[in-house]
Image (tube, helix red, strand yellow):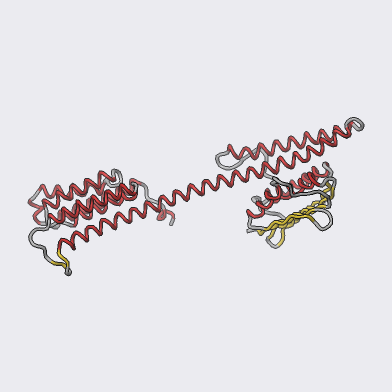
Amino acid sequence: MNLLARRPPPWMLILADTVVAVLLALASTASPPELTTNFVTMALCWLLAVPVAVRRVWPEPAYYGALLIGLAVLAALQTNRLMPTAVAALAIYPVATGRPVWRSAIALVSGLLVNGGSLLLSLPGPPRYSDGWPDPVFIIGTAWLVLAASWSLGTAARTRREFAAREARRQAEQAAADERLRIARELHDVVAHSMSLITVKAGVAAKVLDKHPEEGRKALRAIEEIGRGSLAEMRHVLGALRASGGAPGRTPLPRLADLPSLAHGAAEAGVQVDLSVNGTVPDSMAPAVYRIVQEAITNVVKHAAPAHCQADVSVADGRVRISVVDDGPGQRVLPGGHGLAGMRERALLYGGTFEAGPLPGRGFGVHASWEIP
């Protein structure tokens, strides 16, 4: 089935055109008996078939050559009027498919004039009637209809190809934009989370370093570990920009198994996280789940520490549910912030729902869910 849907290679199309040209030449020389005694007209008929064989290699020269040779054939052999029109119709198709509209339109008008004029000159004597129409009108009208139909089919094919090419470019540009947005979200999540923790730990170190050196050194070591981990994640994310076929990176994408370390880092920044993970998700969804939980906890660290936070991730009945609720104070929706927007985009990417807002009295809640395909 795929072989039938795939476009044949150029050499096969040229071979098919050559076979058609030979069949046309044989048909045109076999029917009129006077060709057996007239070498010139027989040679013209065979020469007229050549444009059909080379129409895909040299479209415009083949087409205009077919018109001129057809004119000579009609002048030399007035009884064989079908061959020149058929060859011109076959030759104009690749012109219509591969050339701009204005050039193919000029070719069509030229063909109508040359073919119609040569047919008119090949009709001897007074006009006879066919189906109520004079012979010149009937014959020339039929020839023009054939030429116009072939040109229309070629123009429609060119339009479809141009549309397919534009659609492919649009999809490629959309894919690139989606990839840039994904990388931007990843960088935002990595940097925002790590810098929030580093800021909190640096403040702790500055306060206790003189009176409690050991606590201060502990905070500095935590800053070093957070910084190294963040650099590794950023190398992985930025590696996607250099990779040709994906994002291999040096470290794996975040998984649900990495959530405990996320909770541990938040605890060092003054936010106690009670983490609950039930069930598993496909590997392709794990980074989104991790980033939503990470960004929600980061908001708590930045705006509400010290606080207590309950983070739940559950997978049941084919649906992922994420809930991060804290009891801390502070305004979470800040002008120019991208955290909530990024979480919402990740949930909507899977056709899910997202809600975030202050809780009655005190605290803030983030809830996201979507179905697993």
The percent coordinates of residue 7 (x first, y second) are 39, 51
Residue 255 lies, in percent from the top left, at 70, 47
Give the residue at the far front of this rendering.
335
Estimate the x, y position of residue 135 in percent, counting from the top left. 15, 63
Q: Would you say 321 lies left or right of 60 here?
A: right
The picture places residue 118, in percent across and down from the top left corner, at 16, 53
Residue furthest to the bottom: 132
Camera-side residue: 134 or 225? 134
Above or below, comparing residue 147 to residue 10 in the picture = below
Of the 4 image quadrants, the one containing the N terminus is bottom left
Compare residues 7 and 204 and report the one nearer the observer: 204
Q: How many marks?
A: 0
- Identified at 66% across, 36% down, the residue is 235
| The C terminus, quarter of image | bottom right
Seen in the picture, residue 221 relative to 339 is either above or below; the reply is above
Q: Residue at x 66, y 58 (%)?
A: 352
Left or right: residue 293 versus residue 111 is right
Residue 6 seen from this side: yes
Q: Residue at x 70, y 44 (%)?
A: 189
Residue 248 position by quadrant: top right
Q: Residue at x 78, y 37 (%)?
A: 198
- The quadrant holding residue 313 is bottom right
Q: Is residue 276 at all visible to an observer of this figure?
A: no
